[in-house]
Image (cartoon, rainbow, N blue to C red):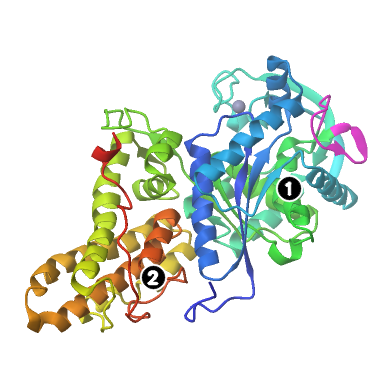
Amino acid sequence: MGPGPQYPHPLVSYYVTTPIYYVNAEPHLGHAYSTIAVDILARHMRQRGEDVFFLTGTDEHGEPVVLAAEREGVTPQELVDRNAPRFREMGEKVNASNDFFIRTTDPGHIERVQEIVQRVHDNGHTYEGTYEGWYCPRCADFKTDSELGPGNTCPIHEIPLEREREDNWFFRLSAFQEDLERLYEERPDFVQPGFRRNEALAFIRQGLQDVSLSRPRLRWGVPVPWDPDQVVYVWFDALLNYVTALGYARDEDVTDRYWPAFHVMAKDILKFHAIYWPAFLMAAGMELPKRLFVHGYLLMGDRKMSKSLGNVLDPFEVIDRFGSDALRFYCFREVSFGQDGAVSAAGFESRYETELANDYGNLASRTLAMVSRYRDGTVPDARPDSGLAADFEGAPARFCELLDRNELTQALEEAWGLVRRLNRFVEETRPWDLAKEDEQASRLDEVLYTLVEGLRVVTLLLYPYLPVSAERLLAALGADLEPPAELGSRGGGQSVDRIEPLFPKLEAQT
Ligand SMILES: [Zn+2]
């Protein structure tokens, strides 16, 4: 699978990350959503011949792990060793193609966190002080006055907060106020979408306060190298995973090859990624991330009963019954990537049936069946239908451009428009009627060739969303996985195979 002619291989790499997931939680749809988004981008870029590194993993230090381990009567290490594999399995289940799975308890990570934190200290961006504030042990975060809920509660966890006072090391975040403002001006797309950028910039402009870099009295973390009675504050420990992984994920250090990264995350961790993280990298004298994309939440909407899933959309049940492709498709089809939006079991089933089974699966089955029936399974060598070719023209480039801007939902819509167009083409041309008349043989050749080629082109676009089905269908079409290509870039003459339905109808599942 080499780079395609119309997308020359840039001499840069594509390094993309999910957040690392806090190991205390059970993997849920929100984690799967971030992982699938990054996987779509990673697969698409690999398909285009880019040098991709896709990182995901687990965040394993901090007080919440200590508290949970105490409750369960196990050590923190036992707790994280038990829970981390659940996230690894979640990634496998959604068919994530990550190049590495980092755990912040990896010795390679710990060693590199200490090196970088020491550099920030040596550069004079730390000092010893006393912190007093409202602390949420479940966020592992001190809340500023503007972040407090009513009655000094955590607005996320809705629990009363303790006033904590402790001696620790501070990071001079306030010293980076102007540098951060300049970053946001000079790189207006540093944070996407734009409304998230504005949110981050507003937070910076209200004035930054220094933040804790370490915590005393906590043993579960990375020891501060110059003051081993303290551990590095879990947020800095976690953020640094994006850099440390490149140092030990492979036999050689690949930091220079892949850094800087493109980070994808949900909106609840915007502040840490959009403000603390670039400031900390500046303090360490390191290059800043290429970009951050902040996505919204999938909210459980409509609870009306669905045919086969009951009334709750459980991502793992969906995958067990319908396959990972169906979940991957639904998440980005139903809710515009970047926004919050409602998902439901009934909505899933409706899109599964009308779009995956009918629009796409049935188009594939019909096309292969007609080539088999009318042309003994050999794709005719013909020219594409000019009307259909005109409607397809430029679509692969538009699709790639949308994914370059991380418009996952719009890119999918662009591809789906072509699926619909191919279905209309079948209805307009009625190949079963053409097959009845000998004098229509060359027109039938043209129609069948156009359908196979259209299906191949659209499947190359859909591959990152539907990798399992796309690979099956490409194999049946006698086609290779290659970069997105224009209609007509492959001639005919291949033999094709009939396949079992890509997306079996719901009736068959229950
Ligand atoms: Zn909280």
- CB within 8 Å, label 1 to label 2: no
Residue 266 visible to the viewer: no
Quarter of the rendering containing residue 237: top right
**Residue type at tag 1:** Leu
Alpha carbons under labels 1 and 2: distance apart:
45 Å
In the image, the segment drawn in magenta is 215-230
Mark closer to the chain start, 1 or 2 = 1
Ligand 1 is in which quadrant of the figure? top right
Q: Position of residue 396 (x, y in %)?
A: 39, 71
Quarter of the rendering containing residue 63: top right
Relative to 256, residue 106 above or below: above
* Magenta segment includes 485: no
- Secondary structure of the residue carrying tag 2 is loop
Q: Work out which residue is located at the far right of the displayed protein and give it.
A: 226
- Secondary structure of the residue carrying tag 1 is loop
For label 2, the residue is 478
Q: Name the residue rendered at 81%, 38% in the picture.
A: 170
Q: Position of residue 216 (x, y in %)?
A: 84, 28
